[in-house]
Image (cartoon, rainbow, N blue to C red):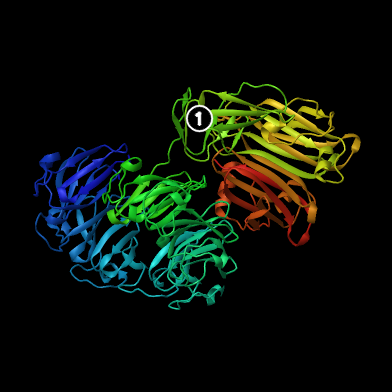
Amino acid sequence: LDSSGNIYVADNGNNLIRKITPSGIVTTLAGGAGLTGITNGTGTNARFIGPIGVAVDSAGNIFVSDVGAHNIRKITPAGAVTNFAGAARLRGSANGTGTGARFYGPISVSVDRGDNLYVSDYFNYTIRKITSAGVVTNFAGPGGTFGFADGIGRAARFDQPLAIAVNSAETLFVADTGNNTIRKITADSTVTTLVGLAGDRDYFNANGSAARLGDTQGLALDANGNLYASDGFYDAIRLITPTGNVTTFAGMPLRTGSINGQAAASTFNTPAGVAIDAGGNLYVADSFNHVIRKITPELVVTTLAGLAGQTGTADGTGTVARFNAPNGIATDTAGNIYVADTSNHTIRKITPEGAVTTLAGDPGVTGNANGTGSAARFKYPYALAVDQAGNVVVTDTDNQSIRRITPQGVVTTIGGVPSDFTSVDGSGTNARFVNPIAITISKSGVIYIVDAGANTIVRGEPETPPVITSQPLALTVTPGSTVVMTVSATGGGLTYQWRLNGLPIAGATNSTLVIPSAQSFVAGGYTLVITNGAGSATTTAVNLSIATTTDSGRISNLAIRSQAGTGAQTLIVGTVVGGAGAIGTKPLLMRGVGPTLAGFGVSGALADPLIDLFAGTNKIAGNDDWAGSFDFASVGAFAFTGTTPKDAALYNAATPLGSYSIQISGKNGGTGTALAEIYDATAPGTFTPTTPRLINLSARTQVGTDADILIAGFTIGGATAKTVLIRAAGPALTPFGVEGALVNPKLEIYRGSTKLYTNDDWAGNAAIANTGASVGAFPFANSSKDAALLLTLPPGGYTAQISGEGGTTGIALVEVYEVP
């Protein structure tokens, strides 16, 4: 690569040097296609004999190791080729300047920041250094003597050094191929072994190069940068810290079995895929035991699903389920586990409680059919990954294809064609694979695939949902899109049910429909059932225009229930309206609920709440006793009770960008339990990338015990997952003058009654600290007892529960930040 992002390629078999621009345009910089020689010249007049290594200096000059000619060539940015070091077709090991030096099979070249060139001189078993003036010396290794030894300069030994790379600190790394090691050479020519031992596969825990590994089949990375590796040869799970220290996480080497219990005494049988959830639990596809194992952060191993040694295809919970040589494994944001049940040719789903179902495929039946659930067919699916929207992407290895499964089990082929063993870039089924075997997905939706049969890494760009505006002709809407249908109907208390070809469309409410899977919409196929408050229904045929929009994930609601009153007991909730690229204003609904809570069984509710909206210290609006006409149901809020509610609410249709606080207090000094709520009231289907968002929601209140802990509900709206930073601040409040702060808050995240994530003491997590700084959160001390979680959550409602460790009480602040 050069500094402008151009790629230079040694096209060895064609004897050419090629250039690829960042936009993908390929040209020949130098050489004649298929013509060998040692001729210097410009562009296609030059000749090479098997060029291999390429490097670029700071001036844009290209250096090439011409292995068949045993010399180093230089190409200017204009394409003029000259001999830089070594004499064409004269091999040897002599040092010298320019053509006075000799090489024997130079392979790889790399340039440091001082424009010195380093060469792996393959058959001389040495690393050579060439200054910008062309002076050649032995940087490491004596030349002509192979072996394995660390040391300084000529005291070191190599065996067939191949690839080399140099970093900004002028440290060189060498793939010492014949020794099966990675070597490190500092600027003073000191050679050490970074990883491995020459010719040695073994099982040994140690740091860096002193460690030994067997057959690593699966890798998973936790939030702290620790790497978990399944060592299938030695039947163990290894833990590798960021500093390179290797230990045994679970299993006993060469002790094949299925023993559960403490990790150090457990046994496995050829563990394959591994995956880690947000709670730090590690899941293992214990392939030859035909089970899925779980290892907790407390190092307790259990069998989550399946029965050791028993193959089969059965769904069920725990040991009732059966698998057949499972391999790939991945988790989603809700804690579900997905398994490529390879020899059953199916994809299985396991809940956190161990309930197994078959998501897609027909057990024991091979094929390549798309479809829903058991109608789909796979052939030895091997690896899988889960994207931010909850779709499972699978390497269908023996079909040479990449398949995608929606959360509803709808299977489509997104790349590749069965039995076409070629490697071709392209879109969808225009792409081709040979043996796709490993896969991962970035947070932005980019898919990376290891095509082992083609020796390539393939990058798949995320799809762009179509934007369609038309009369309802035949069209297809992709998953996650929002279809907006304008309904001409008036009157209070109306409910809507959309039907397509007579069948209800799941997810349709009012005039908005979120498509859970790819569906075709045909003109004249819609009916709309409108039911009024009295229960009578009218069925109307509709023929409407349809527009699809990308309804991106966002924070759309926060609700907190707490004691409220006057003075210091005023319940205060904060929010920030903004977002990158946001323009315009935001419609907000804000509520202070008291009397209506009694209908939900809440005792001691605030009898007459007041609500006030502030920007800084300036009061913008207030309300006592709501008498407005806003449709609460349109944002998912429950109705107030009574014809003249004493509950309070504000609807601000045009809230400018900025920070706000909503204060809930009791009228005439009243106190009691109140519910404070903020809703994003943006009309469904109108959300665009420039629409302002609720990028921060927070609430500060007293945290008690049992029923009086702090419970904050929030909603991820839209149709895609959203990354959020959730914090529970206690000790961090003290520097701000808050007395009686909660000394040790614990943060738990629930969806319904299911606990998904928990944190007690954030422990200076670097990712959380960096994210907090990027979203404008005040810092936590690294050693503080405050709690925080960085999560990517699919659309839906969640609760954040903050309690005091050991039953302690005090004031805490809960915050939910959007992470761009």
* Residue at which label 1 appears: 548
The kind of secondary structure element at disc 1 is strand
Q: Specify the quadrant of the image occupied by residue 139.
A: bottom left
Residue 529 in percent (x, y) is at 62, 29
Horizontal arrangement in the rendering, residue 293 relative to residue 104 (left or right): right
Horizontal arrangement in the rendering, residue 94 relative to residue 353 (left or right): left
Q: Please state which amino acid type lies under the numbered disc 1.
A: Thr
Against 204, is 538 above or below? above
Residue 578 in percent (x, y) is at 61, 33
Note whether residue 84 is visible.
yes
Q: Please rate how many residues cluster around mark 1, counting C-alpha atoms within 10 Å: few if below 14, some from 14 to 19, many from 20.
A: many
Q: Nearer the viewer, residue 741 or 587?
A: 587
Q: Which residue lies at the image location 22% right of the left edge and 71% below the top edge? A: 146
Q: Which residue lies at the image location 82% right of the left edge and 38% below the top edge? A: 596
Q: Nearer the viewer, residue 252 or 285?
A: 285
Q: Specify the quadrant of the image occupied by residue 616.
A: top right
Quadrant assignment for the N terminus: top left
Against 212, is 546 above or below? above
Note whether residue 705 is visible.
no
Quadrant assignment for the C terminus: top right
Q: Which residue lies at the image location 68% right of the left edge and 30% below the top edge? A: 588
Q: Nearer the viewer, residue 93 or 15?
A: 15
Against 369, is 292 above or below? below
Horizontal arrangement in the rendering, residue 292 relative to residue 429 (left or right): right
